[in-house]
Amino acid sequence: MPTVRIALQLSPYVAVRPGELRRAEWSEIDFDNAVWRISAARMKASLGGVDKFEPISGGGDVDHVEEAFGKLVVAGGDGSVDF
């Protein structure tokens, strides 16, 4: 499955800017608590150095979101998601 298609499928569930989605890092995503912590250093507007916490919406079930992320290839060991 092409990664662009996966990104489009994830977009409504994570409500982040496309650039934030492209630069997602596995260490930021907490599926157990259905939240994505985006480092302030990576955001367009750094919010005064405060990390942003984005809920992962899945209608009460984030398994399909986790499965979609799982289809992505992790880039060469640096922890980033490869789109």
Image: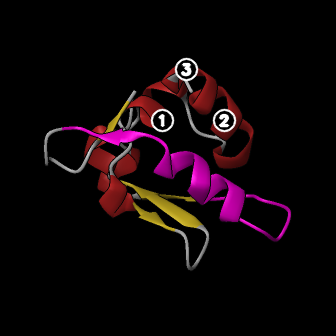
Return the x and y of residue 75 as percentages of the image width and height.
22, 38
Residue at the farthest bottom position: 32
- Which residue bears the numbered disc 3? 4
* Rendered image: mark on residue 11: 2
> Dot 2: few (<14), some (14–19), or many (≥20) neighbours within 10 Å?
some
Please name the amino acid that badge 3 sits on. Val
Sequence-first tag of 3 and 2: 3
- Which residue bears the numbered disc 1? 21
Is 36 or 65 nearer to us in this picture?
A: 65
Q: Is residue 6 visible?
A: yes
Q: CA distance from mark 3 to mark 1?
A: 11 Å
Q: Is residue 14 left or right of residue 78?
A: right
Sequence-first tag of 2 and 1: 2
Q: Which residues are magenta?
A: 55-75
Which residue is rendered at x = 37% and y = 60% of the image? Answer: 28
Q: Is residue 50 visible?
A: no
> Dot 1: few (<14), some (14–19), or many (≥20) neighbours within 10 Å?
some
Return the x and y of residue 23 as percentages of the image width and height.
35, 35
Please name the amino acid that badge 1 sits on. Leu
The image shows residue 41, relative to residue 38, as above or below, that is above
| Quarter occupied by residue 66 | bottom right
Label 3–label 1 contact, CB within 8 A:
no
Q: Is residue 76 magenta?
A: no
